[in-house]
Amino acid sequence: GEAPVLLLDEVAAHLDPEFQHSRIVKPNIDQALHWYRHAAERGEVRAQYSLGRLYGDGRHLRADRRRAEFWMEKAGEQNMGLALRWRALTAEAHGADAATVFERYRRAADQGDLLSALKLADLYAAGDGVERDFAKAFAQLLAFARAGHAEAIGRGPIQLAASLIGNEGEFAILSATPNATNQNTWIKWMKEE
C-alpha cells in the first residue's frame, strides 16, 4: 500500500520518542527505515536526505558511508541544499581536491543553503579551489547577512579586511550612528573574529 500522508512525521516519531508533530510511538528503526526507503525510492527528496543522514551519522544504525553518499547524491540530484552541503563537507573531510569542494559548496549555495554561501565567501577570499575574488567573497557574505545572520554581518567584513592586509596588522571599526539596529551584536562578532 501507499505510505501514510504523515510519512515523515511517522518516521521521525519512530526515531525520536520526544517527537510531537503527530503521535508518540515506540521507536522502531526497522519500520522507520522501511518507510524512509519506500519514500526515497519513489523520489521523495526529504526521505533520501534522511536516509543519507541515518547511514552517515551512525546514531540509529551502523554507519555506512557508501549508502550515505548514495542517498545524499540522490537528494543532491534534486538540488536539495542540505544534501549538497553534506556532500561538500564530506568531500572536504575526505581530502577531495579544492576545486571539487568549491563546486559542491557553490551548488549548495545556489540552492539557497546559507551556510554554504558563508563557506564560499571563505573560499573566494582565500582563493581555495577558485581564483581569489574579494568581490565575490563579499557578495556571498552579503547574501548570508541579508538573511539576518548577525554573525556573518560582524565576522564577514573583518575576514575580508584581514585578507586584504595579509592577515597582519590592525584596523579600526568606525560607525556612522550610535544606534543602528543590532549594531552591538555585529560589533561583538567583529571583536571575537
Image (cartoon, grey):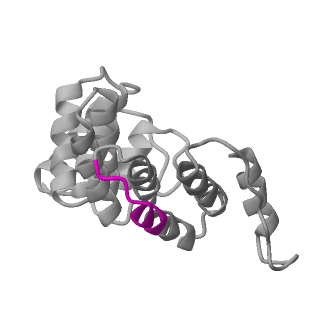
Query: In the image, 102: left or right of 139?
Result: left
Q: Position of residue 44 (x, y in %)?
A: 20, 57
Query: Residue drawn 54% across and 71% down?
Result: 147
In which quadrant of the rendered image does the N terminus lie? Answer: bottom left
Q: How many labels does the image show?
A: 0
Query: Residue drawn 54% across and 73% down?
Result: 146
Q: Where is residue 15 in the image (x, y as percent from the top left)?
A: 41, 37
Query: In the image, 79: left or right of 90?
Result: left
In the rendered view, tell whether residue 184 sits above or below residue 53.
below
Query: In the image, 43: left or right of 127?
Result: left
In the rendered view, tell whether residue 24 sits above or below residue 178.
above
Query: Residue drawn 34% across and 43% down?
Result: 128
Residue in the foreground of this view, choosing between 31 and 143: 143
Q: Where is residue 16 in the image (x, y as percent from the top left)?
A: 48, 39
> Would you identify the image quadrant in which residue 155 lies?
bottom right
Instruction: Name the main secondary structure of what is drawn in magenta.
Output: helix
In the rendered view, tell whether residue 80 sits above or below residue 27.
below
Q: Position of residue 32 (x, y in %)?
A: 30, 39
Q: Which residue lies furthest to the right in this view?
A: 178
Q: Can see residue 51?
A: no
Residue 134 drawn in magenta:
yes
Residue extent of the magenta highlight: 130-139
Q: Residue furthest top?
A: 62
Q: Can see residue 176?
A: yes
Query: Residue drawn 37% across and 29% down?
Result: 57
> Would you identify the image quadrant in which residue 114 lies?
bottom left
Residue in the foreground of this view, choosing between 22 and 158: 158
